[in-house]
C-alpha cells in the first residue's frame, strides 16, 4: 500500500489560469514534452512546464467559417452580477428575468431620472405570446395536460414588473456569476481609439470601433468557453416552489435560447431523493444500529408527508406531485428542442442528482460530472448510469473504506496516521477553476464594496478579491459544457443564419461522438482513470460508468459541425 509508494509531491504546482480551456481544446497550448514514464497513482499527472505556448483557438476557427452569430444561453441559477466587467457586455439584460421576487417575473431598471422614484414599479408582460404547441402533449395524461395548459394560459396573460430598486443580484448571485464567467466571460475590452487588439478580442465589437484594454488594473483578460455568445439570467431560489421552476423553463423556451444550463439540482420532494444503497440498508438492519434505523425511518416518513414531523404535509385529496410531474415532462420535452446541461451532483454518490438523472439516449439532457487534472473523477463528483460527459474542475478529499484522497500539503494531514488504515491512495489535485466572482462583500472572495450597482457610489474597483475567485464542483463542469454547446450552436449558425439551431439530441450526439475516454486532462498526462469510491472493485467497471462518453474535444466537436 502506501509503504510501497513514492512520497507525495511536496509543493503545489503553478498552472495557467485558463488551464481548463486547454484541457477541453478550446485553446491550443503546448505544455512541453510529457514524462517518459506514466505517473504512479500518488504522483502528479501534470508536466513540469507550466507556462504554455498558446497557439490557435476554436473561436478563430468559427469566425473564419462564416459570420459571427452569437448563441443565446439561458442560465437557470441564483442570478448573475449585472456590473461585472467581464460579463457586462455578455449579459442580455433586456431578456434576463428574476422569478424569485415576483410570481410573473421582475426586472431591474438601471436608469433613474427626475420623474422616477425609487419605489415605482411598471408592469411588463414577460410571457406575452407564450405558446408550447410545438412541444406536443409531452407524454402527459389529459388531466395533466389541461393542468399545464392552465399554467401556460395564466403566464401568457400575466404582468410582471420592472422595478427601480436596489438590484438583488448584487448581493446574492455569487454562484450564478461564477458559472456565467465560465460560459461567456470576455476580456473586458472597451470601445475607443487605440491600436487594434489581437484576435479574438478584435471581433468583439461590430461597430467599427477599436477595442482597447480596460483601464481597471484589477481586471484580467478573462475568457469563458464561448466569449462571443450571450447569456440570459433566469433567477430562481432554493425554495421547493415548483411554480418558479416551471416558469423558468417556460421562459427559456419562450426566449428561443440555444442552450439551457442548470448547474444545480431541483428540490423535487420525490425525484430528488437519493436512494439508500444496499450496503447502507443492510447495516441499518443490524442490532447495534437499531436506533439509527428508527431515526432513518422517521425521517423518511416525514419526507413523504405521512408523519407528524412534516409541517408542510399536503391536505387530503390534493395531488402535490402533479406539478412536479408536469415539470419533469416539460424538461424532457424542451430538451428535444434545446440542449439542457445539468450538473451531476457533488455528493460522491454512484447515482446522479435530479434532473441530471433524466438524461437518456432519446432526449437532449446532458449530465456532466467533474474530473481533475490528475485524470481521476473529482472526489465529490457523482457518477453512474446516465452520465453524459465529464469536464475539468477542482478536487475533493475522500477518506472512506475504499480510498484515501487527502491534501498532503495541508497541516492537518500530518496530524493523522492514514497509513495505519492501509487504504489505496489517489493523488489529490490542487488545480481549481478561476472564474468571475460577485463583486463586493457578498461574493465568494468578499470584495470591499458591496454596493457596486448603485450609481451614486460608483463602480467596484475589485480590490480585496472582488472580481475573481476559485471555483469548481459539477456546477463549474456543467457551465463549461454549457459553453461548449454554445460553440456548437454558434458554429452551426455560421453555416446557416442567426435563427438556426440544432436540436437538443443533435447537440448531445455531437458532444458524445467527439468526446474521448482515452484523453488526458491537460496539462496532466494521465488518461482518464477509474477509482474505487463506493464499492470494492468498483474501478473494474466500464469506464463510461465514471466518465460517460469521456472528456469533450471542442475542436473535434466544432469540426464535426463545420464539415459538410
Image (cartoon, rainbow, N blue to C red):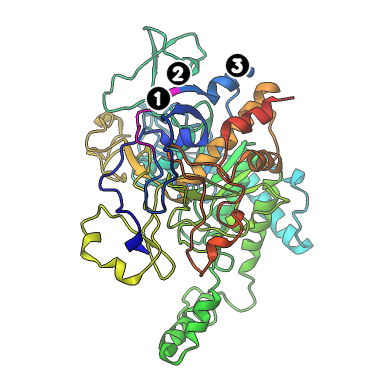
Q: Is residue 345 magenta?
A: no
Q: Is residue 53 magenta?
A: yes
Q: Residue at x 48, y 16 (%)?
A: 205
Residue nearest the viewer, comparing 188 with 561: 561
Q: Residue at x 40, y 57 (%)?
A: 426
Residue nearest the viewer, comparing 371 with 326: 371
Indicate the position of residue 196 as horizontal and vertical percent values.
42, 9
Relative side of 80 to 322, left or right: left
Which region shows up in magenta? Answer: 47-54
Circle 3 Cα neighbour tier, 10 Å, few/some/many (<14 / 14–19 / ≥20): few
Q: Residue at x 42, y 87 (%)?
A: 289
**Quadrant occupied by the N terminus:** bottom left
Q: Mark on residue 201?
A: 2
Q: Secondary structure at mark 3?
A: helix
Relative side of 536 to 541, left or right: left
Residue nearest the viewer, comparing 447 with 197: 197
Verify CB contact (< 8 Å) between mark 1 and mark 3.
no
Q: Nearer the viewer, mark 1 or mark 3?
A: 3
Q: Which residue is mark 3?
A: 64
Indicate the position of residue 291 as horizontal and vertical percent values.
41, 88
Relative side of 359 to 436, left or right: right
Q: Secondary structure at mark 2?
A: helix
User: How far apart are the two marked residues, 1 and 3, measured between alpha carbons?
Assistant: 20 Å
Verify CB contact (< 8 Å) between mark 1 and mark 2.
yes
Q: In the displayed structure, would residue 552 be above or below residue 564?
A: below
User: How far apart are the two marked residues, 1 and 2, measured between alpha carbons?
Assistant: 7 Å
Amino acid at each position: 500500500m502506501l509503504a510501497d509508494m513514492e512520497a507525495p509531491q511536496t509543493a503545489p504546482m503553478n498552472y495557467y489560469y485558463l488551464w481548463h480551456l486547454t484541457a477541453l481544446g478550446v485553446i491550443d497550448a503546448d505544455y512541453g514534452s510529457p514524462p517518459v514514464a506514466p505517473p504512479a497513482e500518488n504522483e502528479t499527472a501534470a508536466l513540469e512546464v507550466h507556462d504554455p505556448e498558446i497557439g490557435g483557438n476554436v473561436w478563430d476557427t468559427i469566425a473564419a467559417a462564416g459570420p459571427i452569430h452569437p448563441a443565446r444561453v439561458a442560465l437557470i441559477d441564483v442570478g448573475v452580477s449585472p456590473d461585472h466587467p467581464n460579463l457586462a457586455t455578455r449579459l442580455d439584460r433586456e431578456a434576463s428575468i428574476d422569478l424569485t421576487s415576483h410570481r410573473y417575473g421582475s426586472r431591474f431598471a438601471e436608469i433613474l431620472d427626475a420623474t422616477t422614484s425609487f419605489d415605482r414599479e411598471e408592469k411588463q408582460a414577460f410571457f406575452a405570446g407564450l405558446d408550447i404547441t410545438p412541444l406536443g402533449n409531452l407524454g402527459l395524461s389529459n388531466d395533466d395536460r389541461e393542468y399545464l395548459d392552465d399554467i401556460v394560459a395564466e403566464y401568457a396573460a400575466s404582468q410582471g414588473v420592472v422595478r427601480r430598486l436596489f438590484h438583488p443580484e448584487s448581493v446574492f448571485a455569487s454562484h450564478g456569476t461564477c458559472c456565467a464567467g465560465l460560459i461567456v466571460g470576455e476580456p473586458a475590452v472597451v470601445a475607443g481609439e487605440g491600436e487594434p487588439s489581437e484576435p479574438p478580442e478584435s471581433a468583439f465589437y461590430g461597430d467599427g470601433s477599436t477595442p482597447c484594454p480596460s483601464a481597471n488594473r484589477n481586471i484580467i483578460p478573462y475568457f469563458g468557453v464561448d466569449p462571443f455568445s450571450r447569456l440570459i439570467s433566469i433567477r430562481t431560489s432554493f425554495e421547493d416552489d415548483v411554480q418558479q421552476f416551471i416558469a423558468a423553463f417556460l421562459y427559456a423556451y419562450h426566449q428561443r435560447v440555444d442552450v439551457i444550463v442548470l448547474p444545480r439540482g431541483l428540490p423535487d420532494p420525490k425525484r430528488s431523493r437519493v436512494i439508500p444503497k444496499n450496503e447502507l440498508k443492510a447495516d441499518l438492519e443490524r442490532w447495534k444500529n437499531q436506533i439509527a434505523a428508527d431515526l432513518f425511518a422517521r425521517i423518511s416518513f416525514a419526507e413523504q408527508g405521512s408523519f407528524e414531523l412534516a409541517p408542510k404535509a399536503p391536505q387530503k385529496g390534493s395531488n402535490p406531485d402533479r406539478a412536479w410531474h408536469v415539470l419533469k415532462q416539460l424538461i424532457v420535452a424542451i430538451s428535444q428542442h434545446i440542449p439542457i446541461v445539468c450538473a451531476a451532483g457533488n455528493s460522491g454518490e454512484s447515482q446522479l442528482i435530479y434532473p441530471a438523472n433524466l438524461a437518456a439516449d432519446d432526449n437532449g439532457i446532458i449530465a456532466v460530472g467533474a474530473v481533475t487534472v490528475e485524470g481521476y473523477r473529482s472526489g465529490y463528483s457523482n457518477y453512474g448510469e446516465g452520465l453524459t460527459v465529464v469536464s475539468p474542475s477542482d478536487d475533493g478529499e475522500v477518506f472512506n473504506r475504499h480510498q484515501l484522497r487527502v491534501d498532503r500539503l495541508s497541516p492537518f494531514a500530518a496530524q493523522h496516521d492514514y497509513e495505519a488504515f492501509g487504504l489505496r491512495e489517489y493523488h489529490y489535485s490542487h488545480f481549481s477553476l478561476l472564474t468571475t466572482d460577485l463583486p463586493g462583500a457578498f461574493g465568494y472572495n468578499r470584495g470591499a464594496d458591496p454596493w457596486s450597482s448603485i450609481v451614486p457610489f460608483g463602480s467596484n474597483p475589485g480590490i480585496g478579491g472582488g472580481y475573481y475567485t476559485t471555483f469548481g464542483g459539477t456546477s463549474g463542469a456543467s457551465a463549461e459544457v454549457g459553453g461548449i454547446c454554445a460553440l456548437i450552436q454558434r458554429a452551426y449558425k455560421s453555416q446557416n443564419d442567426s435563427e438556426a439551431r440544432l436540436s437538443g439530441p443533435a447537440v448531445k450526439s455531437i458532444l458524445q461522438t467527439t468526446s474521448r475516454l482515452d484523453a488526458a486532462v491537460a496539462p496532466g498526462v494521465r488518461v482518464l482513470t477509474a477509482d474505487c469510491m463506493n464499492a470494492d472493485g468498483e474501478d473494474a467497471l466500464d469506464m463510461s460508468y465514471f466518465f460517460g462518453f469521456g472528456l469533450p474535444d471542442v475542436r473535434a466537436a466544432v469540426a464535426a459541425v463545420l464539415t459538410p
